[in-house]
Amino acid sequence: MTPEQIIITDVGPRDGLQNQPKVLRLEQRIALIEALSAAGLPQIEAGSFVSPKAVPAMAGTDQVFGSLQSTGFKTSTIALIPNMKGYQLARGAGVKTVTMVLYASDGMAQKNVAMSMAEAEEVTLEILRLAKQDGIEVIATIAVAFECPFDGPTDPAVVETIAAKFLAAGADQLVLADTIGAAHPQQVRELTAALVANHGAERLGCHFHDTRAMGLANVYAAVESGIRRFDSSIAGLGGCPFAPGASGNVATDDIVMMLQQMGFETGVDLDKLMQASDLAQVLTGTAPGGRSKAWLQGYLAKQAS
Ligand code: COA
Ligand code: ZN
């Protein structure tokens, strides 16, 4: 029987690097993206088109995409955008897939992009309309889908309403983001099961942070509901500079290990993933490296001998 596939998007070069005190040079960002591609990650969030004043680490994302295109880079790359200007810049840079951020709270929308939830929805609908004409895919990500650092716990009904609206509007994917890593597996299971029951799993994905050490458990809960798309970050890098308390994403190192052991196909080569993880740690000097890395390295060394 062919193993069932799970598609992992490594968001390290965006979610990971945006929150680092150290700003990487363009060639370092590109080297990390290339290492992730070499490890077999099928999708990579390679940067964001945001104000360089707001997020200095993402300045020059147009050049990152330009350089990848000029070298015939084949792996699917995604750019995060916060607003219409971001969409226009991404389109100008030849980006084929954008992640546009929606919000399950007004507090987070205001702090992140100085908009209300409703304004972000309106802009996203307009971006979806343009993207259809431009042949660009749109991933709609709902930030603070479980809890907001400003407005507290999120009502699941709010998330369900936004999800239904944007799936109906033709979003290519709809991702639930636990921006600050506050969700627990029971909540995740209930919300993802309800969404899968109403919309099917095909276009749904999840994005977890590991702040309270529940990242992997949340991935498992979502897998149990039928979700087959996950964001994760190499070496557990990550966090949002505008969401106090957010720590790293669930580490790609950990999620790949768990899913492969459960018999899912991720397309990722663990040896090469460890090389990408080492690179992320060397470049940033701060990546935690996930929680399984020491064991994984020992296991891989034993396999090789
Ligand atoms: N890319 C680059 N520059 C942008 C931009 C974008 N997507 N959107 C706006 N700008 C620029 C404007 O041109 C303006 O530049 P100027 O000061 O040189 O004239 C400046 O940013 C402020 O623009 P304005 O429309 O007044 O923005 P704002 O103050 O209402 O909102 C954001 C600020 C949204 C641009 C800024 O906070 C941002 O980029 N946030 C990104 C948040 C983020 O990345 N969060 C983590 C990922 S979810
Ligand atoms: Zn995130």
Image: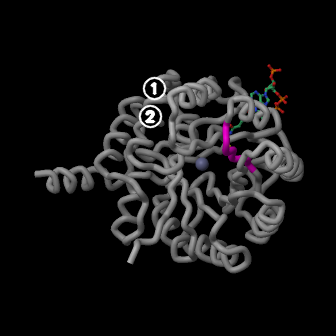
> Which residue is depicted at the point 67% across and 62% down?
146
Residue 153 in percent (x, y) is at 70, 63
Residue 290 in percent (x, y) is at 38, 50
The question of residue 252 being in magenta is answered with no
Q: CA distance from mark 2 to mark 1?
A: 6 Å
**Quadrant containing ligand 1:** top right
Question: Quadrant of the image for the N terminus?
Answer: bottom left
What's the magenta region? 95-101
Tell me the number on the disc at residue 32: 2
Three-letter amino acid code at the position of disc 1? Gln
The question of residue 100 being in magenta is answered with yes
Residues marked 2 and 1 touching at CB (< 8 Å): yes
Classed neighbour count for the residue bearing mark 2: other residues with Cα under 10 Å, few (<14), some (14–19), many (≥20): many
> Which residue is depicted at the point 88% across and 47% down?
126
Q: Which residue is mark 1?
A: 28
Q: Is residue 23 above or below residue 262?
A: above
> Which residue is depicted at the point 83% across and 60% down?
169
Q: Is residue 142 above or below residue 63?
A: below
Frontmost residue, 284 versus 75: 75
